[in-house]
Amino acid sequence: MKPILVVEDETVIRQALKRLLERNEYSVREAGSVAEALNKHQLSDFSLIISDLRLPGAPGTDLIRPAGNTPVLIMTSYASLRSAVDSMKMGAVDYIAKPFDHDDMLEAVQRIIRQTAEDQQAQPKTPGTPLSGIIGRCAAMQRLQKAVHKIAPTDSTTLILGETGTGKELVAKAIHAESRRSNKPLISVNCAAIPETLIESELFGYEKGAFTGANTSRGGLIEAAHGGTLFLDEIGELPLEAQARLLRFIQENEIRRIGSTESIKVDVRLISATHRDLRSLSMQGEFRQDLFYRINVLSLNLPPLRERGKDVLQLAESIISKKAAELGQQPLALSPEAIQGIMTYTWPGNVRELENAIERALVMSEEQSIPLSALGIDLELVQTDTQAEKPKVKGANLKAAPKPAESDADDTSEELSLEDYFQRFILEHQDYMSETELAQKLGVSRKCLWERRQRFGIPRKKGAAASANR
């Protein structure tokens, strides 16, 4: 394993951190400033850089750009909400507040090194151009892009799986754009959007007089895709009758218009997508099993937004630029509270819901930056299933800080530690506020609030919620 570089100007802290890491079998190098780190070391030679934020000469965040793919963990005793968010936006992999707990530091180091290794393994071994319109650097998205680069040059039938709003059509477009059929049409069909009585005629076409209202002959969408690609979105909604016709098209590369006795040969690559479990549907007789096996030659799984880590912030900023241009206005920055809300919320509607939230915020916001309230997201939708298995934590000897004046009780000042602010706010308000109210006031989810309670050793007071509602 590559060594870890510790950049800290206070010798006592630097030596203590070095001993902690070496006791846990990490190799460590040291530097007392950004300049010393750059002059004495090649940053790419390290698996992780742990740097203090405030250093003589230049801040620790100045190491992020020259570090390249080497992750940088920022530690600071000035861990205000803003400085933490700014460090993350500049590219820091994470931050940790001083004085830090030894277990927290070791957990962070282990997690970052493991995640970096996974991300590097997921990267294509041969250079590939980024997929058009697809944004994301998490391990799952890198695996997806690598798979698309492999799949695209073939003519193999492909099934794209993923929750609603994860970008299945974007992936289909990327496959078509990298295929040898890219100069031919890509015909996209949403099977759920076409009435059941019309789906067959839309796909396969019809002859004059085939049914009432068929005054002329008309080719279907499959014919229109000849030489190119047909993308059938939400194929799980296709009626059984249309499924039988589609099966013949896949098997024989030919179609027959409704009302015709002659078959037409077609050269079409088929890409399908669904958010449903087609295997289960086929077992229940709601989807043809033979068709399922025909369309599931190659499959791609799109991760939901809640599993994509910091991709959500990268997506949000990209959407802000795009939507602002469409609306003819200047892009707005996200407030620290909005960033925290975006990173905490689980986005059940995935990228589509994020796009709608950003557009709503740009239209309705009356401030210089986008506040959390303008996004219109309900943090109560954040999953709380971690309650089922609570980790054991050591209790902390905490005392409530003196209560500030009413006017500044909710002020997140630059000089106030983020960790201290959370502890102080919870201790001062938990007697008369419910968990939901505490979470909303802090701009976090109930899950995040619970995790902070565990971390700080602040048990939830029994009866607090009830007294808050009296």
Image (cartoon, rainbow, N blue to C red):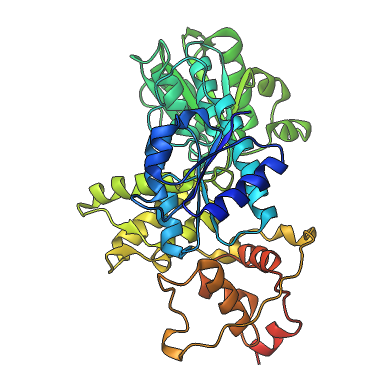
Q: Quadrant of the C terminus?
A: bottom right
Q: Quadrant of residue 112?
A: top right
The residue that appears at 61% across and 10% down in the rendered structure is 251
Q: Is residue 322 left or right of residue 399?
A: left
Please identify the residue farthest to the front as the structure is shown: 11
The residue that appears at 73% across and 81% down in the rendered structure is 461
Above or below: residue 217 compared with residue 363: above
How many discs appear? 0
The residue that appears at 61% across and 31% down in the rendered structure is 118
Where does the image place residue 323, in percent across and percent down from the top left? 30, 49
* In the foreground, 339 or 162: 339
Q: Quadrant of the N terminus?
A: top right
Above or below: residue 93 compared with residue 102: above
Above or below: residue 185 compared with residue 346: above
* In the foreground, 420 or 89: 420
Where does the image place residue 311, in percent across and percent down from the top left? 48, 43
* In the foreground, 184 or 334: 334
Where does the image place residue 380, in percent across and percent down from the top left? 59, 66
Where does the image place residue 298, in percent across and percent down from the top left? 61, 19
Please identify the residue farthest to the bottom as the structure is shown: 470
Residue 206, visible in the rendered structure: no
Residue 120, visible in the rendered structure: yes
Q: Quadrant of residue 431?
A: bottom right
Q: Is residue 51 left or right of residue 66?
A: right
